């Protein structure tokens, strides 16, 4: 008889500006993965700011003019993003005008004049967003403001795909949205039921891991300075902009990886910890936030909340520390 628990189906798609990898175990069908991708596409259609029309583009086009009604899911995600932005720890869902000024990772990348940066800072104030819970309307109060949920959308969509899998009775699988990883259930292909999660080496090309971590169901998300860079006049600028200064946030971190229960939460916590500049005594591990891995520019790996027996160093040129 076929070992159904170990049966695997896998399919690759393209969406959200990246490669999408869906893997499910057990009795899942290819049509289940296609349904998952269709769900992803529906959210992308509503949330993208890289097309001329979408729910978010309707909001942005009406900035300074009028409130715009959106769907329930777009409204709730926006509400979470604005609430998080108002905590002022580095996450900012309105940072679009600054991103477009720098263009790091895109054609025309440059170091903008100080005056241009200063002029854009007034357009990224999260207190200048009016949300109506009864009408599901979003109003950007100043002309030129732009709402961009790119820093949180992948996590939200991964969580919704997991919800779909639960409704379909899919008990275990991997949802990989361009490096945003969500692992559902136990890993049937490993005797201990734990997943193997590779941690990217931030100093080499994508796909090279410096750590392997054994863990149960979780989401693992990384923020790093290595993906998009601008090199000019002997200086290097990364793409993670500080909304307080308008410039890339400078610290000794090359990347931060966070392990959480939900993927949208992982998106938020990676940003929080990157802007915190490293492990913080007041960053509490909870029932929904499991641990974090910090990799510094001087090749030190600092690990919080994970057991040493579950962490395997693959490159001994790095120093390993457990906090």
Image (cartoon, grey):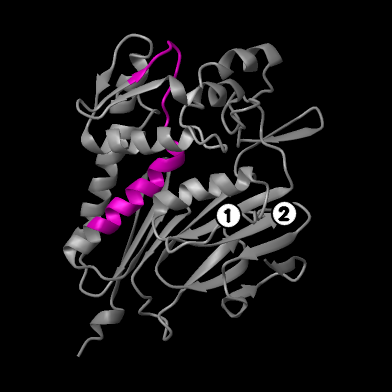
Q: Is residue 307 left or right of residue 262?
A: right
Quarter of the picture containing the C terminus is: bottom right
The label shown at residue 296 is 2
The label shown at residue 283 is 1
Q: Is residue 124 left or right of residue 110?
A: left
- Is 142 colored magenta in this rendering? yes
63 is higher (above) or lower (below) than 256: above
Q: Is residue 172 left or right of residue 310?
A: left
- Tell me where the magenta segment starts and ends, as one range: 139-163
Q: Position of residue 121 (x, y in %)?
A: 58, 19
Using a 10 Å C-alpha cutoff, classify the residue at mark 1 as few (fewer than 14 neighbours), some (14 to 19) or many (20 or more): few
190 is higher (above) or lower (below) than 241: below
Q: Nearer the viewer, residue 36 or 59?
A: 59
Give the quadrant of residue 161.
bottom left
212 is higher (above) or lower (below) than 278: below
* Count of marks placed on residues: 2
Can residue 178 be seen?
no
For mark 2, give the secondary structure: strand
Residue drawn where x is 40% and y is 28% of the image: 50
Can residue 124 be seen?
yes
Residue drawn where x is 49% and y is 61% of the image: 259
Give the quadrant of residue 284.
bottom right
Check the image and name the residue furthest to the right. 234
For mark 1, give the secondary structure: loop
Q: Nearer the viewer, residue 215 or 304?
A: 304
Q: Position of residue 207 (x, y in %)?
A: 57, 59
The label shown at residue 143 is none
Q: Of the residues under marks 2 and 1, which one precedes in the sequence?
A: 1
- Is 91 colored magenta in this rendering? no
Using a 10 Å C-alpha cutoff, classify the residue at mark 2 as few (fewer than 14 neighbours), some (14 to 19) or many (20 or more): many
Q: Are marks 2 and 1 in contact (CB under 8 Å)?
A: no
């Amino acid at each position: 008889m076929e070992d159904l628990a170990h049966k695997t189906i896998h399919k690759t798609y393209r969406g959200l500006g990246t490669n999408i990898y869906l893997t499910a175990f057990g009795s899942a069908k290819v049509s289940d993965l296609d349904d998952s991708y269709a769900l992803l596409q529906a959210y992308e259609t509503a949330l993208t700011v890289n097309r001329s029309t979408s729910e978010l583009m309707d909001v942005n086009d009406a900035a300074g003019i009028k409130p715009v009604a959106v769907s329930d899911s777009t409204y709730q995600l926006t509400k979470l993003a604005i609430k998080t932005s108002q905590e002022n720890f580095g996450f900012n869902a309105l940072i679009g005008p600054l991103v477009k000024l720098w263009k790091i990772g895109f054609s025309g990348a440059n170091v903008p004049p100080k005056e241009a940066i200063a002029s854009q800072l007034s357009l990224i104030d999260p207190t200048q967003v009016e949300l109506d819970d009864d009408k599901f309307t979003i109003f950007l109060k100043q002309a030129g403001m732009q709402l961009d949920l790119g820093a949180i959308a992948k996590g939200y969509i991964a969580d919704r795909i997991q919800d779909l899998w639960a409704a379909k009775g899919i008990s275990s699988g991997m949802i990989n949205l361009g490096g945003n990883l969500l692992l559902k259930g136990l890993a049937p292909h490993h005797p201990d039921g734990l997943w193997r999660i590779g941690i990217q080496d931030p100093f080499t090309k994508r796909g090279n891991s410096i750590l392997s971590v054994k863990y149960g169901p979780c989401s693992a998300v990384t923020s790093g300075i290595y993906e998009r860079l601008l090199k000019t006049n002997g200086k290097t600028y990364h793409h993670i902009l500080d909304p307080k200064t308008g410039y890339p946030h400078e610290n000794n971190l090359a990347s931060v990886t966070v392990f959480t229960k939900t993927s949208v939460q992982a998106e938020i916590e990676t940003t929080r910890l990157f802007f915190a500049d490293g492990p913080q005594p007041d960053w509490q591990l909870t029932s929904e936030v499991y641990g974090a891995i910090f990799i510094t520019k001087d090749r030190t790996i600092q690990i919080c909340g994970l057991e040493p027996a579950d962490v395997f160093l693959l490159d001994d040129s790095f120093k390993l520390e457990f906090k």
